[in-house]
Image: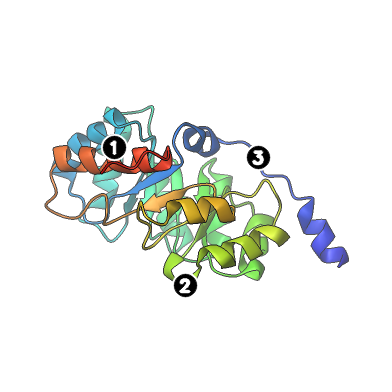
């Protein structure tokens, strides 16, 4: 019990990620995006009010896309997803990325990001992983895969995690289930294939982004 009480006093620093998600609590996951299309898609997301973009490292030339968007739209928070080791953190930093997102919790990845002044959102699925990630310095927590972490589980996790910890379900998030997750204590979401998939043009991405924005505001379009 003493250990749990100690964890409840963890303070999460306010970062550019928190500010961006306060504007709109959604992260765009552009898995498969190409460097020749990324800037147009970045502008489409910007026009729709999104402020955080993640380019998974298993996309074509992801560092080139991160560099291009970081230069073209510097007010957006651009970074990488599917980051699995500390060397990749350094590579993303050199490309101009400011955000590290991972499918798992690896303390070395979190610490490498924090040491470079970046924000880090590791993937967790249990309270044990979540508390360890916060101790390591995580900026927020990616609840992944959300298909395995329903709203009832988020509510249970919220009861034992610091109130300031940001919980971001990722995986299978749609307009139809966002309200239930918010009610359970989620702070925002990562949106992947429902927003962008390879071959989807900038205008279609913008429309999907506006639809998700409306869903967040509780005014889902018919």
> What secondary structure is found at the residue carrying circle 2?
helix
User: Mark 3 or mark 2: which comes first in sequence?
Assistant: 3
> Residue 128, located in which quarter of the rendered image?
bottom right
* For discs 1 and 3, the disc positioned in front in the rendered view: 1
Q: Is residue 160 shown above or below 99? A: below
Q: CA distance from mark 3 to mark 2?
A: 28 Å
* Residue picked out by circle 1: 210
Q: Nearer the viewer, residue 159 or 190?
A: 159
Numbered label attached to residue 13: 3
Is 211 on the left or on the right of 138, as rendered? left
> Is residue 84 among the parts visible in the rendering?
yes
User: Mark 2 or mark 1: which comes first in sequence?
Assistant: 2
Q: State the residue at coordinates (83%, 59%).
A: 5
Q: State the residue at coordinates (23%, 34%).
A: 44
- Mark 3 Cα shell of 10 Å, populated few (<14), some (14-19), many (≥20): few
- Mark 1 Cα shell of 10 Å, populated few (<14), some (14-19), many (≥20): many
* Residue picked out by circle 2: 148
> Is residue 121 among the parts visible in the rendering?
no
Where in the figure is residue 58, as x and y percent of width and height? Answer: 28, 61
Q: State the residue at coordinates (18%, 35%).
A: 40
């Amino acid at each position: 019990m003493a250990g749990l009480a100690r964890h409840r006093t963890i303070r999460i620093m306010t970062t550019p990620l928190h500010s961006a998600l306060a504007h709109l609590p959604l992260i765009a996951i552009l898995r498969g995006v190409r460097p020749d299309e990324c800037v147009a898609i970045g502008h489409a997301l910007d026009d729709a009010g999104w402020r955080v973009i993640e380019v998974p490292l298993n996309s074509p030339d992801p560092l080139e896309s991160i560099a291009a968007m970081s230069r073209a739209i510097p007010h957006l928070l651009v970074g990488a997803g599917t980051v699995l080791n500390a060397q990749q953190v350094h590579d993303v930093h050199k490309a101009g990325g400011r955000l590290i997102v991972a499918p798992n919790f690896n303390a070395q990845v979190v610490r490498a990001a924090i040491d470079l002044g970046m924000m880090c959102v590791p993937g967790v699925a249990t309270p044990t992983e979540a508390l360890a990630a916060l101790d390591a310095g995580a900026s927020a927590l990616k609840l992944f895969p959300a298909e395995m972490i329903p709203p009832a589980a988020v509510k249970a996790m919220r009861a034992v995690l610091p109130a300031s910890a940001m919980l971001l379900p990722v995986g299978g998030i749609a307009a139809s289930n966002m309200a239930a997750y918010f009610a359970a204590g989620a702070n925002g979401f990562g949106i992947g294939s429902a927003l962008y998939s390879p071959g989807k043009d900038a205008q279609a991405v913008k429309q999907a982004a506006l639809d998700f924005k409306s869903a967040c505001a509780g005014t889902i379009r018919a």
